[in-house]
């Protein structure tokens, strides 16, 4: 089984795809350049200059991303996409080139049996039409409840840390809306912070990705379930700096502890599982 991967350049993307490379025949990698993990003066997609925010919110914004950077360095060892060169041919692209002819030609040349996608922008119809029938996207968020952007942040803002997880789904020409193969949530442990839950989601999702791909490699059937349109598609512009007050000012990043104590209710997501 030949797998072609689509990867972003962040360390979490490399962590997942490197493990796939170690376990399967990866024939090629389309690598899309992503925005810096430590934001500057503006938020991508949002024209607001952060220096116009209240000083407290500027500090929370900086704190939030410094915490994420610290956790991701700890969990993912700061690896880069250069590691793919050891496994397969690599096509590096900028976001505007993701749906270009050169990507189409690369796929046609590699003739993959399956594509695995994690960390790139929306793949459009002109590329999807020449991809294998089974092309799986790993979305860091439980669809349909949390689709779109920052979908491991919003469960914490909504005081639902138990809804922080991931979804493996078929790609379609709409964000995170394809038929679902499998969903993953990490075990919430006392003392877990928002970013630690996010990192544990990636680690558990990596393990499940390997299991799913082995099932597919062995020609075993995985039923797909259509998504119900009962969730929300979060956009980059939905995020405002004052949202961070919930995480850090009100709860001091101890939302998991409050959930474990039973102070945030006991509603749990009904997950779709390819296996137990």
Image (cartoon, rainbow, N blue to C red):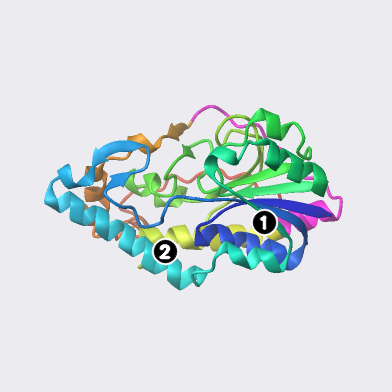
Q: Helix or strand or loop: what does disc 2 sit on?
A: helix
Numbered badge on residue 196: 2
Q: Which residue lies furthest to the left in this view?
A: 55
86 above or below 17? below
- Magenta stretch, main secondary structure class: loop
Please state if 4 lies on the left or on the right of 41 as rendered.
right
The answer to whether residue 106 is magenta is: no
Quickly name the residue at label 1.
209
Please state if 199 lies on the left or on the right of 7 as rendered.
left
28 above or below 120? below
Cα gap from disc 1 to disc 2, whole angstroms:
20 Å
Q: In which quarter of the image is the N terminus?
A: bottom right
Please state if 173 lies on the left or on the right of 69 as rendered.
right
Q: Which of 110 and 102 is in front in this view?
A: 102
Q: Position of residue 64 (x, y in %)?
A: 30, 57
> Dividing the picture into quarters, in which one does residue 127 lie?
top right
Q: Position of residue 239 (x, y in %)?
A: 32, 40
Q: Can residue 95 be seen in this view?
A: yes
The answer to whether residue 225 is magenta is: yes
Query: Residue drawn 72% across and 38% down?
Result: 104
Going from N to C along the chain, the mark reached first, 1 or 2, is 2
Q: Helix or strand or loop: what does disc 1 sit on?
A: helix
Q: Where is residue 244 in the image (x, y as percent from the top left)?
A: 26, 49
The mark tally for this picture is: 2
Q: Position of residue 57 (x, y in %)?
A: 18, 50
The crowding category of the residue bearing disc 2, from other C-alpha atoms within 10 Å (few below 14, some 14 to 19, many at least 20), is some
Please state if 27 lies on the left or on the right of 165 as rendered.
right
Q: Which of 244 and 230 is in front in this view?
A: 244
Query: Residue drawn 25% across and 53% down?
Result: 61
Q: Quadrant of the C terminus?
A: bottom right
Numbered badge on residue 18: none
Q: What stretch is highlighted in magenta?
A: 211-230
């Amino acid at each position: 089984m030949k797998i072609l991967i689509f990867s972003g350049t962040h360390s979490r993307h490399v962590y997942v795809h490197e493990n796939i490379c170690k376990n399967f025949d990866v024939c090629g990698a389309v690598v899309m350049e992503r925005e810096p993990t430590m934001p500057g003066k503006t938020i991508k997609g949002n024209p607001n200059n952060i220096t116009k925010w209240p000083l407290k919110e500027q500090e929370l914004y900086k704190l939030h991303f410094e915490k994420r950077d610290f956790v991701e360095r700890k969990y993912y060892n700061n690896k880069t996409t250069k590691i793919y060169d050891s496994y397969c041919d690599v096509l590096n692209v900028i976001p505007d080139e993701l749906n270009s002819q050169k990507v189409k030609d690369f796929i046609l040349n590699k003739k993959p049996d399956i594509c695995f996608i994690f960390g790139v922008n929306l793949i459009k119809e002109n590329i999807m039409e020449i991809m294998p029938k089974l092309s799986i996207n790993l979305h860091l968020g439980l669809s349909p409840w949390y689709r779109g952007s920052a979908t491991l942040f919003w469960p914490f803002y909504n005081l639902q840390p138990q809804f922080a997880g991931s979804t493996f789904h078929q790609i379609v020409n709409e964000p995170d809306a394809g038929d679902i193969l499998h969903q993953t949530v990490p075990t919430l442990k006392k003392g877990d912070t928002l970013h630690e839950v996010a990192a544990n989601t990636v680690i558990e999702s990596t393990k499940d990705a390997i299991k799913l791909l082995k099932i597919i490699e062995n020609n075993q059937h995985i039923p797909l379930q259509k998504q119900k349109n009962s969730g929300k598609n979060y956009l980059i512009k939905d995020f405002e700096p004052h949202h961070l007050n919930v995480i850090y000012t009100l709860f001091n990043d101890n939302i998991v502890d409050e959930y474990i104590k039973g102070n945030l209710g006991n509603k749990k997501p009904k997950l779709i599982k390819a296996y137990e």
